[in-house]
Image (cartoon, rainbow, N blue to C red):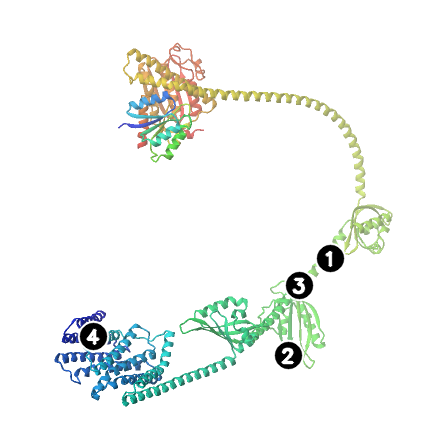
Amino acid sequence: MMKKVLVIEDNPDNLRLITYALSRAGYEVISAGSGEQGVDLALSEHLFFIIMDINLPGIDGIEATRRIRSSKADGSIPIIAVTSYAMSGDREKILGAGCNGYIEKPIDPVTVVDTIHSIIGLEAE
Amino acid sequence: MKRAERLIFLVGIAGVIAGTIGIRTAQDISWIKFFDNLHWTFSTASAAILVWIGWRNSKGTEHSPMLFWSAIGLTGYALGQVAWDIQTALSYEKFPTPSDLFYLWIGPGLCLGMFRYIRGLIRREDRIPVLLDINALFIASLTLVLDLYLPKRGDISFLHLAVLVAYPLTLIMAFCIGLVMIPALKLKNTPNLWLFLMSVGVTAWSWMRWNLMALDGKTIDGELLNISFSVAVLFMGRSLARWRPETSSNASWIEACESILRMLPLFSVIIASIAVIVTFFRPDLPALVSKSTIAGSLTVIVLAIVRQMMLLREIESGQKALGESEKRYRLIVSTANEGILVLGPDAETVFANARMADMLQLCADEIIGRPLADFVFRDEMEDHIIRMKRRREGLSEIYERRLLRRDGETVWTQVSATPLFDEEQRFIGSFGMFADITGLKMKENALRQSEEALRLREKMLNESQRVGQVGGWDWNQERDSFWWSDEYCHIHGFDTDMPPQNYEAHLKSYTPESAAQLDAAVKHSMETGEPYELDLELAKPTRATRWIVARCEVKRDENGRICGLRGTVQNITERKLMEMALRSALSYNRILIETSLDPLVTIGPDGKITDVNAATEAATGFGRDDLIGNVFSAYVTDPSAAEAGYQRVYAEGAVRNYPLEIRHRDGRIMPVLYNAAVYRDEGGRVIGVFAAARDISERKKAEDEIRRLNAVLEQRVSERTSALEHKGEELRESQIALMNIVEDLNEKTAELEGANEKLKELDRLKSMFIASMSHELRTPLNSIIGFSSILINEWAGPLTGEQKENLSTILRAGKHLLSLINDVIDVSKIEAGKLDSFDEEFDLFELMSEAVQSLSQEASTKCLKVEVRAVHKLMNCDRRRLLQCMLNLVSNAVKFTETGSVTVSSASREGGMVEISVSDTGIGICEDDQSRLFTPFMRLETNMKSVVPGTGLGLYLTRKLVKDVLKGDILLSSAAGKGSTFTLLIPVNAAGRA
């Protein structure tokens, strides 16, 4: 059975790009276009990890992460943030909210999955 | 044992039931007889065995003899039954039968047993009444029985009759004894007891009925009567086996027993009367019957009368004894010297004797019903409650208690209190005897008070002597002995417990002069009888000077002869010392006054001089004696001014610097200033004026000179002032001009500030614009780079060579655009001072390798050799920014080098710095350009410009990052055509930098 992952991303192009990379790596990708929707899915689905865009309409990725961490019984699900290079200084906020790591935009579809794996792998140690 | 007992009883019951059923079902008379005998035998045998078991269990108790004799009786009965069985089997029916010999044991056995029992338990004086009771009852019963038997006598022999009568009689006797025994011994009312009595009664009655039937010649086999025998005997055995009666303590039952005992004679009489009445209604009876009945009845009546008389006498004597003892007690109570109170359970008074009432000045009736607490003082109430509680707990006590008399006075009592309990140990109150100890207490108090007063007086004497520092003494001439008070000792420096001295020894307490004075005075007084008063100084071997005043008068004996002296001494050391000090102070003052150079005078209220000093004599030319007594105004030039000044002093208390002129006797005039003040006596009354004059002749001269000089000075000052005023005018004008200039400047400054604000606002807008623009630009770039990358990697399908090349152009262009945007963002951030740094630990070697690695592809396409000569070094600073700098430098090196190599090296430097160098063998930078290299948008004129892409921001940004973020420095050494070396000096530990 394919492992299910959630991508929370409002930009359809970005979403398509990362979905492409993840699907190729053998993941079943489900997506959410807003923070609220993402939190609902994260709490209802059994997921392998979550890709979280920080800059979202409605609640932002930091708040969404915080909600998932505080309400999900299994709080250990990996959450990987996707941040914009311009948003420096958000790094502490992102990790503080409970993200396991982050990837900077632009995403390189060739290397992104390895980066994600290394973040999760580091986490598993 | 209990089980054996139960088993035997059950066997008996089984026998009776079997016999009964057998009789009811059998047809043949011989079988009926057999069953008849069967239940008889079983019941009697069982009963006998049960009683023997009971006897065994009761050994050593008071029940033992009764059970023993009962057991004998029942055993006889059982044996009789066995004999009867044999007789029946042999059909032997002649009288007397052997069975009768045994049967007869039962009545006497029971009687004897009960007699022994009663005898063992009853009081000696109750024995005869009980015996009488039993006899009366028995004879009455006998009379009744004979009354029934005799008419049926027929022709049977007397012996036979006697035997027939003996059965019920002995049993009736036993029943009577039992009946009397219960009330006489006040045995506990138990079912077992009644079962026993009933079984004896039923047996007696059955025997009587049986015998009567036998006399009537009726056949008696298989009768129900026979079964009643068996049942009664069986229950008799069972009740005796459990025979454990106890004396009852239940009051009402005991009372009932007493009543039954009193009623017994009457009961006997009633039975006898019934017998007489029966006889009366049957006139056909033989004379023997009537006679015996009447005889029996009479006996019963006599016995009853005797018994009743005894009872009456008993009651009477009891009442008399009770009355006498009560009278005796009443006498004791009413004549007792102690107050007696009986309190109820709630401490309320139930009884009070006359003495008690007397003590409280109340009638006994007024006390009764009131709680004792009514007479207890409030301060003792708590104690009273505790005492009452102790009574309740059954404690007796003797203690003192103050009681409140009706007139409010206190009665001191000693109380002896005892709790009272009824027969069932319930608390019903207490008994208290109150001995009046008020007199004793008063005496005790008075004694204590007088002792106290005496002690107080002595203490006061000592205290007053101590306070007044007055000591008392007494001297007896004959014995030459002193008595002196504590303070006397204290004044003299003696210990209070020092043994008294004689006269000669005591004289040594004073200085030799004082001792001589004292000795003379004492001798004079002893001769003449006159008192003396002397100031004496104490000898001072160890103490400071000490003066006393000794006052003394003579003592005379009853004949009026002088026999000694007594007096007081008072410590006057302080006074004496003060006097001396005063004296020396006075002479000192006089010296001071005389030494004064200022003429001093004192003037009385009348204006006359009272005292002068030497200076006054000199000023006036008159002698002291001439001056004193004359009016002061006579010695000044203006007497009226002197008078006025003098009046002013009186009015205001003092004057200062009052000018007068003293006229010398030879006509010289001395100008003076007087300072004068009133002076007062100790009571505060003004007694004169003290005036001190100061010679001001010299001062006057000096003043005149000063005044002249002053005038000259004033002239000069006014000249100078006008010159200055002119200068001041000029100054003011130039000041106004200056102020105008300053105002202009202020206006300009405000304008500049406004412009500055606008500039700042513009700068902020620019930064915002760049930030948002760059973000917006990057989003589409994301897709361009991402999807071209996908396509190039042929994820979407294979590509032709041309397609691949085109795509890689798109990808490269996209990446370049991205790096341009990133540089723009960084520059704008750095300029706005908004670039944050994030320190972390990393290895320098790894960082450098990463930088080289990311550019290895470009280097290899140009066939450049890239070398890393780095050390492993743990650094702690902003890794990302350092990497960015390295990438910039290395990519520059690769860009501007066509052949040769790029070398990246690192080395530690002192001061916690690390040196990182990027060298190339490229085109190099000429010296003129080197200074402009680090300015923004600077692109050097090279022949390569057209092929090397760039914004001109790279080095500017690098230098900014190195200096502002990494706090390091960047150096360049290069020459055109000879390659370049960029060197970074970075602190190893960011925390260490300034």
Q: Of label 4 and label 2, which has the lower sequence position?
A: 4
* Residue type, mark 4 in image: Ser
Q: Of label 2 and label 1, which has the lower sequence position?
A: 2
| Closer to us: B550 or B520 | B550
Q: Of label 3 and label 1, which has the lower sequence position?
A: 3
User: Which label was assigned to residue B586?
Assistant: 1
| Closer to us: B342 or B822 | B342
Secondary structure of the residue carrying tag 4 is: helix
What is the x, y in percent for residue B429?
A: 46, 72
Q: Is residue B224 left or right of residue B418?
A: left
Q: Of label 1 and label 4, which has the lower sequence position?
A: 4
Q: Identify the residue under disc 4.
A: B43
Answer yes or no: do the residues labelled 3 and 4 have beta carbons within 8 Å? no
Secondary structure of the residue carrying tag 3 is: helix
Task: Give neighbour class at mark 4: few <14, some 14-19, many 20+ (Cα, 10 Å).
Answer: many
| Closer to us: B460 or B54 | B54
Chain holding disc 1: B
Q: Residue furthest front?
A: B284
Relative to B405, residue B842 above or below: above
Q: Nearer the viewer, mark 4 or mark 2?
A: 4
Q: Nearer the viewer, mark 3 or mark 1?
A: 3
